[in-house]
Amino acid sequence: MQTFENAKAGDIVQALAERIIENRAYLSEIDGKIGDGDHGVNMAKGFGLAAERLKDKDASLAEALETLGTVLMTEIGGSMGPLYGVMFTEFAEKIEAVDAIDATAYSRMLHAGLEGIQSIGSAKVGDKTLLDSFVPAVEAFDAAIAAGRSFAEALEALTAAAEAGRDSTRDLVAKIGRASRLGERSLGVLDAGATSCAIILRELSGGARARLR
């Protein structure tokens, strides 16, 4: 059975922070087409602060996720801070006591984060939000495991589904947040939250896959 160690895997979060910071301008550009235009700036600020606090700490994945979640909930503006903050703190809580993370533990982590987001918002799949990336990704992971595929293969399926979900938001009309005021004019543009969610899920899953044994 494939697993990866929780201990010392906090650098997965460091790599994730680097990727978000790299995409700061892109995420804000997307957001600016139908939203406030500050998504990339706020995300880069929060992830950068967390990375700074984790520097040289040799943290576990759970500790790093907890640090990131707390920073996002308490220190950045915008609507995404609380949503991602809850997601990451729920991730951390679910794997805190798990030494070797297997596919079952990873699925529990994903579901806890998803439920956390759903508990503080009314969005659903099809509303042109991060859930359009997140929900299909979790479903694809679980379906792959149920079909007897390996942890590594399930992580690949998760990533592909997250990115397909992101791309699907081009054809959706926004139902939540500022973009919803634009109605049909929100068509043809990617959702910034779905885009950042796809980046997050790709980096987390890629980091996990690289450590499997």
Image: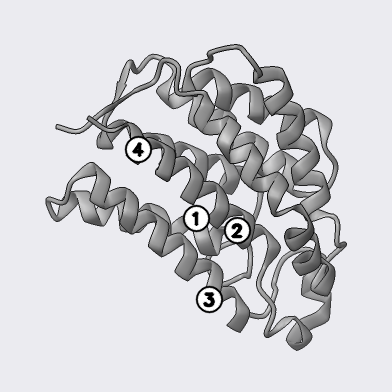
Which residue is label 3 attached to?
Answer: 168
Q: Are marks 2 and 1 in contact (CB under 8 Å)?
A: yes
Q: Is residue 167 above or below residue 109?
A: below
Amino acid, disc 1:
Phe
Q: Which mark is first along the chain, 2 or 4?
A: 2
Q: Is residue 183 left or right of residue 194?
A: right
Between the residue at mark 4 and the residue at mark 2, the CA separation in whole angstroms equals 25 Å
Which residue is label 2 attached to?
Answer: 130
Q: Is residue 203 above or below residue 108?
A: below
Between the residue at mark 2 and the residue at mark 3, the CA separation in whole angstroms equals 11 Å
In terms of depth relative to the viewer, which is nearer, 2 or 70? 2
Q: Is residue 70 above or below residue 171?
A: above
Q: Which mark is first along the chain, 3 or 2?
A: 2
Between the residue at mark 3 and the residue at mark 4, the CA separation in whole angstroms equals 28 Å
Which residue is label 1 attached to?
Answer: 134
How far from the left and from the top, in percent, is residue 112?
46, 37
- State the quadrant of the C terminus: top left
Q: Is residue 17 left or right of residue 36?
A: left
Between the residue at mark 4 and the residue at mark 1, the CA separation in whole angstroms equals 21 Å
Q: Which mark is first along the chain, 1 or 4?
A: 1
Question: Which marked residue is nearer to the observer: mark 3 or mark 4?
Answer: 4
Q: Which mark is first along the chain, 1 or 3?
A: 1
